[in-house]
Every structure is written in C-alpha cells, then in structure tokens.
Image (tube, helix red, strand yellow):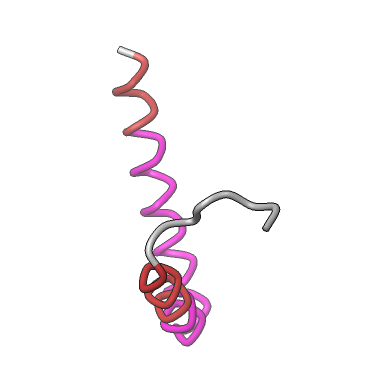
Amino acid sequence: MTSGFMGPPWQMDWTLKAQAARDALPEHVRKMVDAARAELVTAAFGAAQD
C-alpha cells in the first residue's frame, strides 16, 4: 500500500454521502453553500494569523 492512513472507514462513506447530497441541490443553493464555506475558511485563516 503506497498511501498513508486516511482515517476511519466510515468517514469516507459520510463524505461521499455529503457530496451526493450537495450535488443534488439546485445550482444557486450550491453557490450559496460555497460562498458560506469560503467565508468560514477565510475567517478561520484570518484568526489563525492573529
């Protein structure tokens, strides 16, 4: 095996289900989710820099 440990096996199942649920949303809702996630990442990155 060439790759390292990727976490518990149920974690991958959860992320695949979450991706499928997100992909089932209308495009305008996916764009809102993406924008909100970008805000959270930006806020977390900015807080880590302080």
Q: Which residues are magenta?
A: 19-43
Q: Is residue 27 above or below residue 43?
A: below
Residue 34 drawn at (x, y percent):
46, 59
Residue 50 drawn at (x, y percent):
30, 12
| Residue plotted at (48% across, 83% down) | 20
The part of the image, by quadrant, that contains residue 10 is bottom left
- Residue 43 or 4: which is nearer the viewer? 4
| Residue plotted at (44% across, 54% down) | 35
The part of the image, by quadrant, that contains residue 43 is top left
Can residue 40 be found in the magenta stretch? yes
Q: Quadrant of the N terminus?
A: bottom right
Q: Is residue 16 above or below residue 32?
A: below
Q: Is residue 20 above or below residue 8?
A: below
Task: Name the side, left or right, on which 12 lies relative to 47.
Answer: right
Residue at the outermost bottom position = 24
- Residue 27 or 6: which is nearer the viewer? 6
- Residue 16 or 8: which is nearer the viewer? 8
| Residue plotted at (70% across, 53% down) | 2
Residue 8 drawn at (x, y percent):
37, 63
